[in-house]
Image (cartoon, rainbow, N blue to C red):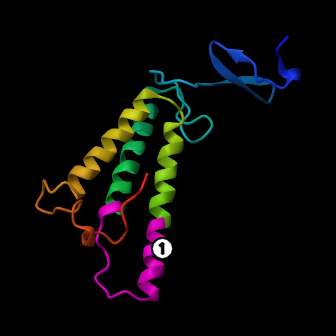
Amino acid sequence: MEGMNSGHMPRVNGSTAIPHRHKMMMMHMTFYWGTRAEILFSGWPDARIAMYAVALLFVFALCVLVEWLSHCRLLLAKPGVAVGVFRSLLHALRMGLAYLAMLALMSFNAGVFLAAVAGHAVGFLAFASGAFGRLGYAEEATSDLPPMSC
């Protein structure tokens, strides 16, 4: 018999149930549509559709920001220790935000996935595609940071 005492997590409707303070929480293991999702924090967004829309906008903006950091040109100074430290901090910020976006995607909510893809697409269009006069993707010298290698 499979249960809590056998070392396996119980399954409810195809999803793994995680015990949490004497309640069972659902954790989706496949993509699903719906506004009842937990993204990044327990209980966020709540059951209101407006809060779900805010969460989608947050993920969208987060991905646009990752693209901007990937293609921005803030430093015009010659290389040195201060510039190297600043670039390292920018890289850490970019990677932290990218991991935050990845954690949001682990909610397996299809709306969050689409918001992230749209955010990266809009960010690339605005900052690297050349559609607005600057071609940043092909020219390595147009960014303070090396391209992400994921």
**Secondary structure beneath label 1:** helix
Q: Quadrant of the N terminus?
A: top right
Question: Which x, y percent locates residue 67?
Answer: 33, 55
> Could you tell me residue 20's position as x and y percent?
76, 30
Packing grade of label 1 (10 A; few <14, some 14-19, many >=20) is some
| Relative vertical location of residue 122 with respect to residue 32 in this rendering, above or below | below
Image location of residue 102, percent across then percent down: 50, 44
Residue at 40 percent across and 37 percent down: it is: 56
Q: Which residue is mark 1?
A: 88
Q: Nearer the viewer, residue 47 or 65?
A: 65
Look at the image and say whether residue 77 sits in the magenta stretch: yes
What is the total number of numbered labels drawn onto the structure image?
Answer: 1
Q: Residue at x 38, y 55 (%)?
A: 66
Q: Is residue 33 above or below residue 41?
A: above
Residue at image position (82%, 14%) is 2
Left or right side of 15 for 19: right
* Image height of 41 relative to 81, above or below: above
64 or 130, nearer to the observer: 130
The residue at 31%/86% (across/down) is 77
Q: Is residue 111 left or right of residue 5?
A: left
Magenta residue span: 70-91
Q: Amino acid at mark 1?
A: Ser
Looking at this view, name the residue that lies furthest to the left. 133
Task: State yes or no: residue 45 in magenta.
Answer: no
Quarter location, residue 40: top right
x, y percent for residue 112: 43, 34
